[in-house]
Image (tube, helix red, strand yellow):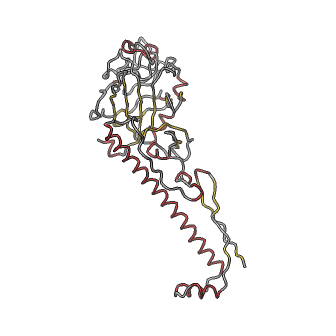
Amino acid sequence: MVSPLHELFFYEPERSCYTNISRTVRAIPQDQYTAASGSSDARDFNSSSLSVSDRLDALATLLTSTALNVRAVQWDVAKLAQSINRQRRVSHRKGLGQGPGQGQGQQPPIFYGPSGPGGYQPSSFTRPPSSCQQSFLAIEGILKVQLTPESESFYVACDEDWTVILNRSSDELNFERGWLDYKDGFGNLAGDFFIGLNKLHALTSSAIHELRIVLEDFAGNVAYAGYSTFAIGSEKELYPLNLLGRFQSDLTPSAGDSLSYHAGAKFSTVDADNDNCIDCSCAQKHKGAGWYNNCGTSNVLGQYFQQNYGRAGETGIFWDTFQGKDYSLKRIRMMIRPVNEEEARR
């Protein structure tokens, strides 16, 4: 005799579908129950007044609970793998004497944790991650994030647990662009790009973030600038730099603070003059875009100079407290990551 088990389904949000975990159970003759076990529990089960249907329901509940517990354990293993990877990267950097954002040297081995049946990974039963703090799910440094269950997902570039919002390393991409380009973002996440003001506003509105900037000159000197909090407003407000926290002077080598002067300023582009300069357009003057005050002590979205970078003037990519306003930098990377409330108060 074959008895169909009630169909059981497990919802997997990432796939937006239900997985059927039911199976058909064959009834076993009563004499086989008795032979299989001499325990009192088995005898009580066989002699109970439960109907076959009730017993199948109980078994179905047990199977469902077991499946959920297995998936929870797999998720815990994946979280442990993330922690192990992070510790390995820190140890690897210390061994090479590198600072944050530097990726030189051999990549330490990465532990991803075991896959479940059918190649299961933790992301198969949760929605996409909301930040690069779950970068162990990234592929080649690219991660699909979703800030809320209702919002659209999008791709970001990760540098460990940092979300990269700006990367510049060559003159192949023009940054002297209009408002719409800066609103939506442009470039290649695997190379040079700007994430886009809409995404940046969504990210910094979803949680309190800190800001890290990595700068490098053409002599190979690297310096860092960090700010304890960072957030921008909406397009309706003209994407102002609403929140810029304490400058983190403990980062070494320090690039100095060349961004605090821009705090509170609205975003300007060559076709949208929202700066605080009464008789000029800072974006046109500096051939770029940014949160210009009158005008600025940095120009991270200015022109890239492959040659004559030491005499580029204020149209180049400069950070006043690192090599001055006339020097256009070779590389610059801006990154953000969420911080908890205790860290934000420091």
Question: On the picture, is 338 further left or further right than 175?
Answer: left
Between 83 and 8, the residue placed more toward the observer is: 83
Q: Which residue, as the protein is rendered here, is positioned at the far left? A: 250
Image coords of residue 25 (percent x, y): 66, 74
Q: Position of residue 175 (x, y in %)?
A: 49, 21
Q: Quadrant of the N terminus?
A: bottom right
Q: Is residue 119 left or right of residue 222?
A: right
For the residue pair 278 and 152, the one nearer the viewer reads as 152
Residue found at the far right of this picture = 1
Which residue is farthest front?
Answer: 106
Looking at this view, is 161 or 147 the one in front? 161
Q: Is residue 208 above or below residue 28?
A: above
Quarter of the picture containing the C terminus is: top left
Number of residue marks: 0
> Does residue 154 sit above or below 23 in this rendering?
above
In the picture shown, does residue 176 fall above or below 145? above
Q: Position of residue 323 (x, y in %)?
A: 32, 20
Query: Relative to residue 123, is residue 250 depicted above or below?
Result: above
Q: Residue drawn 56% across and 55% down?
A: 120
The residue at the point 34 percent across, 44 percent down is 91
